[in-house]
Amino acid sequence: MQFEEIQRVEPYLLSKEEKEPLLTKRLLSLTEHHRKNCPEYRRILESIGYSNREISSYTELPFLPVRLFKEIPLKSMPGQEIVKTVTSSGTTGQAVSRIFLDRTTASNQQKALVKIVSSFTGSKRMPMILIDCPSVLKNRAAFSARGAGILGFSIFGTEKMYALDDEMKLNLSALRDFLDRHRGERILLFGFTFMIWQHFYQELLRLKQSGTVFDLSGCMLIHGGGWKKLIQEAVSREAFHQKLEEVCGLTEIHDYYGMVEQTGCIYMECEYGHLHASVFSDVIVRSPWDFSPLKPGERGILQVLSTIPESYPGHSLLTEDKGILLGEDDCPCGRKGKYFTVCGRLANAEIRGCSDTYAAGF
C-alpha cells in the first residue's frame, strides 16, 4: 500500500472502523519492506519468530524500543540514497538517535505535517514569528531535532522573523517592526516550550512591568518539545496559557507531541487540551508489566505508529513516555481518532525533548 492513498484522507475524518484496516494494510506493508531492506530489523523479527500471516491488526505488530536508534544505525536503503540525517535532542554526554532519510520519506514527512497542522491553522499561510535564534539552522544536511522542527514548521509562514538573537535575547526592535508591518493580520508563532517561557514570556513580563506591552491577541502559538523543566518549576499547562494571555493577549495555544524518530506524525493538542492521533499515525498505551494494550483511563507506556518511514524501520516504536488514552472518536472538539495525554518520562529514562534538553543545558 502506498502512502499517497492515506494522504488523500483528511487527518481527523476516519472513525475506528474505517481507520484500522487502512493502518493495518499500510503498516504491514512497511514491516515487510523493512524486513527485506534492513538486515538488523530482519534479524530482530527472526529472533521473535515474526510472521505477517499471523497479524490481523496493526495492534499486533512488533515494536522497537525507541532507544535502539541510539545504539545502532538502522536504515532500509543504500547509503547513497541518504539525503538528510536528523539527530535527536540530547544533553552533553548523551547518545543521540540518528535517523536517515531518503527523498521519499523526507517529502512524505512534510506532506503529513502540512495536512495535520493546516487542519488547525487553516490553509492560508501567515506571517510567522519563530521563537528561536537564526543559528539553529546551521547544517541543512545534518539537522538536530530542534532545527528540523524549526525548518518543518517554517513552511507555514510567509514572511518569517526570529524573535531571539544568537545569545537568546529578545530582539525588541525587530519584533516591534514585524508586528507593526503585520498589524491586523493573524500571525503564527512557533517555538519550544521552555524557550518560550524563559526567553519570550519572561522578557515580555519584564517589559510589561516597565510599561511596554506587546499585543499578540488574535495570533496563534504552536509549541512542543517537552514540559519536564516547567513542571519542576510548578508551571502547569493551565498556568502557561494564563500567563501568556496576561502578558500579551495570546489565547490560541496548541502544544504538540512528537519525536525525531517519527518526524511528520505529530500529535496536535486540540482546544480541550487533548493530543490527537491523525490518519497518519496511532498511539497504543501498553502495560509496563506485560506490554498488553490498556483501556482508556489506565496509565502505561506509549507506543507510537507512523505510516511514513520508508527509509528506516521507525513505523512501530515503544517510547520511554508514560501516557493515558482518554478516548476514541468522541472528543468534544469533534475530531475522530484516539486522543490521549502524556504523563511524563519513565523513571531513569534520559531527557530527550528539544525543550527539555535545552532547559537542562540552560
Image (spheres, rainbow, N blue to C red):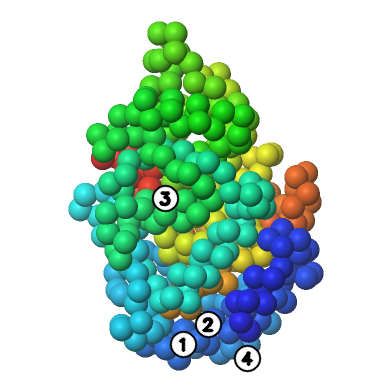
Closer to the observer: label 4 or label 2? Answer: 2
Residue at x-position 39% and y-position 15%:
206
Circle nearer the N terminus (4, 2):
2
Is 150 situated above or below 3? above
Mark 2 and mark 3: Cα distance apart in space = 30 Å
Circle nearer the N terminus (2, 3):
2
Mark 2 and mark 1: Cα distance apart in space = 6 Å
Asked if residue 245 can be seen in this view, the reply is: no
- Amino acid carrying mark 3 in the image: Ile
Q: Nearer the viewer, residue 245 or 305?
A: 245
Mark 4 and mark 2: Cα distance apart in space = 12 Å
Q: Nearer the viewer, residue 165 or 180?
A: 180
Q: Is residue 323 left or right of residue 102?
A: right
Q: Element type at marker 2?
A: helix
Residue at x-position 78% and y-position 70%:
18
Q: Which mark is residue 150?
A: 3
Q: Badge 1 is on which residue?
A: 35
Q: Position of residue 50 (x, y in %)?
A: 52, 86
Circle nearer the N terminus (3, 1):
1
